[in-house]
Image: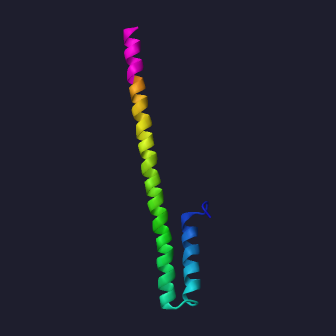
Amino acid sequence: FFELPPRTLTIIAVIFGYLMIDDLTAVEQNSLGNFLMLIGQMLETNSAQQQLFNSKITDKRLEILEKNYEELLNYIKRA
């Protein structure tokens, strides 16, 4: 699933959508659509927050590396 090309995945989603249209009433389609969108929003929110945390960790590591680099340069200049 995660290794499918974007267009293939989109086509599969379109096919599933069309297949479900005839079997569901408008109210059922609306309910299911909202449910699936909620799942998508939850996944988006979680992944965005995870990316934020990861970037903060990366920023902190970069800060530590820069400090160590400066300390190393100062040590070399004094030697």
| Residue positioned 39% across, 20% down in the render | 71
Q: Nearer the viewer, residue 69 or 2?
A: 69
| Residue positioned 44% across, 40% down in the render | 58
Q: How far across and how far down the image is residue 4, in percent?
A: 60, 63
Q: Considering the whole magenta stretch, tell me its main secondary structure.
A: helix
Residue 6 in the image: above or below residue 71? below
Locate residue 48 relative to residue 13 in the image: left or right: left
Q: Nearer the viewer, residue 74 or 4?
A: 74
| Residue positioned 47% across, 53% down in the render | 50
Residue 79 in the image: above or below residue 56? above
Residue 37 in the image: above or below residue 18? above
Start-end of magenta stretch: 70-79
Locate residue 58 relative to residue 7 in the image: left or right: left
Task: Check residue 74 for magenta coloring.
Answer: yes
Q: Nearer the viewer, residue 15 or 35?
A: 35
Q: How far across and how far down the image is residue 57, in percent?
A: 45, 42
| Residue positioned 39% across, 18% down in the render | 73
